[in-house]
Structures are given as structure tokens and as C-alpha cells.
Amino acid sequence: MDNLKANVILDAKGLACPMPIVKTKKAMNALEAGQVLEVLATDKGSKADLKAWASSTGHQYLGTIEEGTVLKHYLRKSSGAETNERKHPNVANNEELDNKLKNNDHIVVLDVREAAEYAFDHIPNSLSIPMGELESRLNELNKEDEIFVICRTGNRSDFAAQKLAENGFTNIINVVPGMSQWTGETTSINN
């Protein structure tokens, strides 16, 4: 696939969420409308993350090619008229979620991190559906439930909350800052 031409190549190898998106956003800002950005990444979650980010900003996600451990993501910058980064409007902080859990409120905690992230540290009884699998697993969720979506920092969960809202879920809350600063109860494959 040497015939794929990118205007700019961004090296995001070795970086974990949210850094590939942060660097992609900065690189995309420097491009002209219609130009193509190639993002080199090793984070397996970057495919779903960049696809969701492109969708939420109006940029075009062209596709991903895997070469060994490196993922080559291709994104096309849209014109200013096409781009308008959205954020899910319903947000709760970690303390609000922890209080809901302690009060035994009937809620669903949806963890959209990768399976390995979830395995080593997650909120007890949370449901693990990695961002990349969300669309194909929507049937596992009840549209009537109050769903708190969590990831490591609030970025993937924001994209997931938007995706759920687009699919008719009405009571979706994005948890910020997420597991990176979670001080409530957790469980792990180690305990």
C-alpha cells in the first residue's frame, strides 16, 4: 500500500489515550482543508478513538492499515464549514458517580476502555464494552437505563456518550475525569 499519500505524517507510537488524539488534533489544525494526515500509533484503542474523534469533529476518517504492531490511521481534514467539535452535554464528575454508587441508585456504569485496561482496574459491577465494539454491542444496553460512561480521561467516554445518544439512548452521562483520577472502590483481576 505504498500508493497511499499523506500530506503530513504524525508519529504517535508508544503513546496511550488521550495523547494520540491530542497530537492528531494539533496536527490537523495545521493542515489545509482536504489534506490527509497519516497517524502512526501502537495503541490498539487508537483506531476506535480516532474514528470517533473524526466523527465528532467533522473530519473524515479514511481507514487504518496494520503493519506489524504499528497502526497507520488516515484522516482527511474537512473544510471549516464541515468541522464543529461536539461534546456530550450531560457530564458528571467522579465524586457524583461515586455518590450514586454508594447510594445504590439504579444506574449502569459502562466502561469503554480496552479489555486489558478494564481487567487491571475497574469499578465493581461495571459493564465492559470497549469503544471499538460499542456499535456492534448496543443491544446489550437498555435505552431506559441511566448510563454513566467512563474511560481513562473522559475523551473516549465522551465519544461513546455521543454515539449512544445518536442511537436513541436518552439518559447518558459522561464521567470526567474518569478512571485516571478515580478514588472510589475498584476491583482487578489481581484481587
Image (spheres, rainbow, N blue to C red):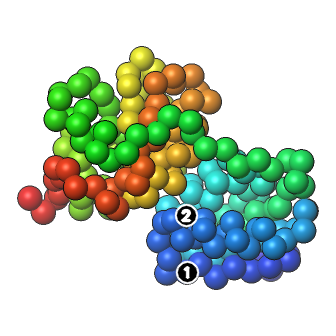
Disc 2 residue type (three-letter): Ser
| Residue depicted at x 83% and y 61% | 77
User: Residue 94 at x, y = what percent?
Assistant: 32, 47
Residue 85 is tagged as none
| Residue 62 sits in quarter | bottom right
Element at badge 2?
helix
Asked which quadrant contains residue 88, the reply is top right
Q: Nearer the viewer, residue 169 or 38?
A: 169
Q: Establish if 27 lies above or below 128.
A: below
Dot 1 amino acid type? Lys
Q: Residue at 56% x, 36% y: name it.
A: 89
- Of callouts 1 and 2, the N-terminal one: 1
Is residue 90 toward the left or the right of residue 87 in the image? left
- Taking the view exactly as shown, the residue that stands out farthest to the left is 191
Residue at 91% across, 62% down: 34
Q: Position of residue 99 (x, y in %)?
A: 23, 37
Q: Residues within 10 Å of mark 1 (few under 14, many from 20)?
A: some
The x, y position of residue 55, in whole percent, is 70, 48
Callout 1: SS: loop
Which residue lies under the disc numbered 2?
46
| Residue for badge 1 | 13
